[in-house]
Amino acid sequence: MSVYGYVQIALFFVAVFATTKPLGAYMARVFAREATFADRVLGPLERLVHRVLRIDPHADMTWKTYALAALTFHVAGILVLYMLQRLQGILPGNPQAMGAVAPDLAWNTAVSFVTNTNWQAYGGESTMSYLVQAAGLSVQNFVSAATGIAVAIALIRGFSQRSAQGIGNFWFDVVRATLFVLLPLSFVVALVLASQGIVQTFEPYVTVPLLEATKDASGKPVVDQVLALGPAASQIAIKHLGTNGGGFFGANSAHPFENTTPLSNFVEMWSMFAIPSALCSTFGKMVKDVRQGWAILAAMTAIFVPMLVLCTWAEQAGNPAFAGLSIDSVPSLLSAGGNMEGKEVRFGISASTLFATVTTAASCGAVNSMHDSFTPLGGLVPMWLMQLGEIVFGGVGSGLYGIVMFAIIAVFVGGLMVGRTPEYLGKKIEAFEMKMASLVILIPASVVLVGTAIAVVTAAGQKGIANPGAHGFSEVLYAFSSAANNNGSAFAGLGANNVFYNIALGLAMFTGRFGVMVPVLAIAGSLAKKKLVPASSGTLPTHTPLFVTMLVGIIVLVGALTFIPALALGPIVEQIAALATGS
């Protein structure tokens, strides 16, 4: 890897951690209803929204009411987005006169964007009108991300409140997350992206002459090209900040109109980690012990860095199957070396592997390279980051509440070791919390493994597999890992736009999102009712390097025990076969 690659990675971490504390402190003030610099501008707008929607911001909800409100809101969102797609052909904002989206694809896409997954079995520029992109998909990018933040804040309240019946107000939290966090950040990022040449227009597509004429597959001359345009910059901003990932164009962030320059690439990567990282600081401030937030952030970083190193090393080392051939894969001034298949030359290996690791750690799913073209070990990294539960930074809100579930399990194990009732942040962790935390971990894992098994043994599932053998299995395993953990990226070799995968992956996305969210809210409600237990000499400190190490160990152990057998059938055996071929 070049010096430029090392510098870029170092600058990325500097940029993320430099904004963690100020952004985290700001969000803590926002959700604690304290005064912020944004109140003068956004306060009147928030109050107007409350009046129009008849929201009582001071009404407290039990966890069941909070969960019911979230489910009702998002089921309604699925129906509205489904109808927008089905009626696309007769609605305005459609200068390319695109027809209605097929029922199974419309279902899949509606569930995908409502669950913050943004799995795309279609090409955006050839399938969705401007109206659907802007008023349908972009709106869900905001509110699905806001819901993740809201649930994380509700869980934090469960720890910080004493003997309370409620955990906050879902409608207030979603409105505040949208207006005070996501909208301002998206506005700034969209301006930066537009300044780099990312398109933002409602004009129709443009036809331009080719510099050199060519011929199509049938031998007919081709003298011009249609350039797809649209209001992209605004959607690209929230797709990264909200860890959504759905691209305006089919090629996602590898498309030159979505990701134009090294600066836009850097800003997009920073955007994916900015809020998840800052929420760790918010967590520490709202529970009145900032060390707890830094411990969570340290655990995330301790897992992320080795995964980044492994992915970059695997891609820079090149395809092991080529080892016995006369192929020069050594980097030099004139060659990037390594495995450049599926990567943009303007980004190279380091920016591609950093982006791939960030987007699958952050539950975003945006891509600037094709993960299907990675080496077996290089492709294993993003797959396993998703399978860990999207908790290594993770999605906005969902990453924090996901890793807190593992922290609850870690303190439970620690309590068993010393023979004490486990406590976390002054709240006793009892049977109910452990059952709910177990569901959070088991539900997505079960969906991944069962869904993959069904797909590879049924004729309908096998039809979408383009590559035979281990790599074809990896494509299916990656798809269900991505769907159940609400990531949205894919191994591109899988033909997923058919009835089987559209329905199956849609069910996986819905179950993976709300099958996790409801148990988290149940834990929040249970903890809120409990009294604070004063710390004693027997209390396990949860802010020390020892606890961070224990937390990381439990995450890795659970991930390994759950998915190593499946990974052994895919990328691991593929790596062994490639080594045997190249030797």
Image (spheres, grey):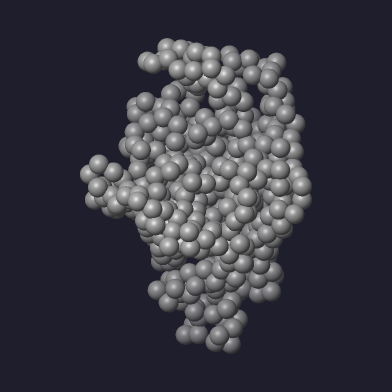
Task: Indicate the quadrant where residue 292 lies.
Answer: bottom left
Q: Give the residue displayed 57% in from the left and 29% down from the top.
A: 124
Task: Residue at 70%, 15% (x, y): give it.
Answer: 90
Identify which residue, 469 or 555, lies in the foreground: 469
**Left or right, 242 with reference to 290:** right
Residue 473: percent from left, percent from top: 63, 54
Residue 171 visible in the picture:
no
Residue 17, horizontal then vertical, whole percent:
35, 53
Q: Is residue 327 left or right of residue 166?
A: left
Task: Tell me which residue sits at (69%, 46%) in the image.
Answer: 505
At x 45% / y 22%, what residue is drawn?
A: 200
Quarter that holds the C terminus: bottom left
Q: Is residue 245 above or below residue 572?
A: above
* Rendered location of residue 570, percent (x, y): 58, 58
Q: Is residue 352 visible?
A: yes
Image height of 277 relative to 549, above or below? above
Q: Give the percent coordinates (x, y) of residue 393.
A: 47, 55
The number of numbered badges drawn on the structure is 0
Residue situated in front as seen by the camera: 190 or 57: 190
